[in-house]
């Protein structure tokens, strides 16, 4: 089970890189169009093109990345507790520390890069960015996971003994948050009740946002025997559901964009996305007799996933901006732009890890990459 979890972690970090490559693809397709087309403002003529639907399809497939990460983290937290009643605060701090020091390093590095570009913030601004992960759009994940680790001693007794109620409650919370966000997208902030508006603005870094996935991993960790029996009975249902949800998810988001009246919307996780993620994770563990391709290589990525996650953000940003400045015509050719973003997004962090691991800075490796 542990090996399969590491493999899932490896798949998840690859999916994160593809997801952010797609994000840069949409940036090139819309806000950056004046850089390579004879227009004076961003245009949305490429909506509905082959390149557009390619990006949407990839985005839909890889949306499972963060749920998978949180599932694995929850499972290993249950594994840490073992047969004891609960985890100790020393164990919790050990996990928090593994996240915190690399997070501080890369946050400071990103702040230095912003400062070099002339972006200076008040002290309160830096505090908000640090505690919410807003330094980059992706760093919210670290404060989110730290909250889950800190809450673990309070969640574990329920995950052991009242797991059905725990899953139902956290599932309802996630369903409510996602439904409220969709209602606001379709109707605007003025067209929904106050409590729906409050739910809709719950930020991604706040523990309620994705608590279900962490709890699910923890519950599975404590009840692995029942979980395996359940998967064996419904494995084909999960596989078919995951496959069907991919095209349905693409159609769903296109419908949301159309009914919202916008030209384009940055993707947000929907209820259908959660169904897909759940089916994907369950199908992945249901077919244990299927050999995993590149098992060692992908599992190694899973071990290094946190360091890759932190480092790939600046790597991809500088790559995209370099292309913007030096080869702007490439922004309009997604067939080339996407592979370049993926290769640099994965290759630069792995190269940095290798260099640090083979240099005198090796003693600080864990403080940089976790």
Image (spheres, rainbow, N blue to C red):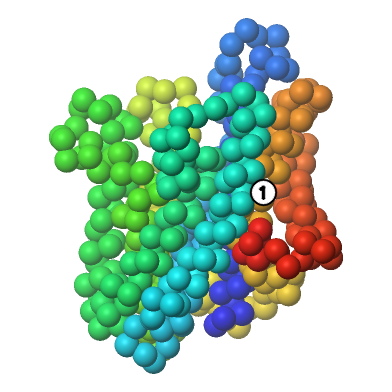
Residue 171 spot, x, y in % from top left: 29, 61
Of 125 and 135, the residue lying toward us: 125
Residue 18 spot, x, y in % from top left: 64, 48
Of 197 and 82, the residue lying toward us: 82
The answer to whether one can see residue 273 in this image is: yes
Residue 89 spot, x, y in % from top left: 39, 76
Q: Quadrant of the N terminus?
A: bottom right
- The residue at which mark 1 appears reads as 312
Does 260 sit above or below residue 146?
above
Label 1 Cα neighbours within 10 Å, binned few <14 / some 14-19 / many ≥20: many
Horizontal side of 148 relative to 24 (left or right) equals left
* Residue pictured at 45% horizontal, 71% vertical: 93
Does 31 sit above or below residue 106?
above
Quadrant housing residue 43: top right
Quadrant housing residue 77: bottom left
Number of numbered discs on residues: 1
Q: Quadrant of the C terminus?
A: bottom right
* Residue pictured at 71% horizontal, 36% vertical: 318
Query: Mark 1 falls on what kind of element?
Result: helix
Does 52 sit above or below residue 293?
above
Residue 27 spot, x, y in % from top left: 60, 29
Q: Residue furthest front?
A: 123
Of 237 and 42, the residue lying toward us: 42
The answer to whether one can see residue 28 in this image is: no
* Residue pictured at 52% horizontal, 76% vertical: 285
* Residue pictured at 24% horizontal, 67% vertical: 168
Q: Residue furthest bottom?
A: 83
């Amino acid at each position: 089970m542990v090996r399969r979890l590491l493999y899932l972690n490896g798949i998840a970090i690859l999916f994160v890189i593809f997801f952010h490559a797609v994000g840069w693809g949409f940036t090139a397709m819309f806000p950056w169009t004046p850089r390579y087309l004879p227009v004076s403002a961003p245009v949305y003529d490429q909506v509905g093109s082959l390149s557009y639907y390619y990006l949407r399809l990839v985005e839909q497939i890889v949306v499972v990345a963060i749920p998978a990460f949180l599932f694995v983290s929850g499972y290993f937290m249950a594994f840490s507790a073992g047969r004891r009643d609960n985890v100790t605060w020393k164990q919790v701090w050990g996990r928090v520390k593994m996240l915190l020091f690399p997070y501080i390093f890369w946050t400071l590095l990103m702040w230095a890069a912003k400062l070099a570009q002339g972006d200076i913030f008040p002290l309160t601004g830096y505090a908000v960015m640090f505690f919410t992960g807003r330094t980059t759009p992706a760093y919210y994940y670290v404060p989110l996971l730290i909250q889950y680790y800190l809450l673990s001693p309070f969640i574990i007794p329920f995950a052991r003994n009242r797991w059905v109620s725990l899953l139902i409650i956290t599932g309802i919370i996630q369903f409510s948050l996602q439904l409220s966000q969709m209602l606001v997208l379709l109707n605007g902030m003025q067209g929904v009740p106050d409590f729906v508006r409050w739910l809709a603005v719950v930020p991604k870094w706040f523990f309620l946002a994705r608590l279900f996935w962490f709890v699910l991993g923890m519950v599975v960790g404590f009840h692995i025997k029942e979980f395996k029996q359940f998967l064996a009975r419904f494995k084909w249902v999960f596989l078919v559901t995951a496959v069907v949800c991919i095209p349905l998810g693409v159609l769903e988001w296109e419908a949301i964009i159309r009914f919202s009246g916008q030209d384009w919307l940055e993707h947000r996780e929907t209820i259908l996305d959660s169904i897909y993620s759940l089916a994907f994770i369950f199908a992945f563990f249901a077919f244990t007799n299927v050999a995993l391709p590149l098992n060692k290589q992908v599992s190694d990525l899973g071990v290094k996933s946190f360091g890759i996650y932190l480092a790939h953000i600046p790597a991809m940003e500088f790559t995209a901006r370099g292309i913007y400045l030096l080869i702007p015509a490439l922004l309009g050719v997604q067939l080339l732009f996407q592979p370049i973003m993926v290769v640099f997004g994965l290759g630069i962090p792995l190269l940095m890890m290798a260099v640090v691991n083979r240099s005198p800075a090796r003693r600080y490796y864990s403080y940089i990459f976790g």
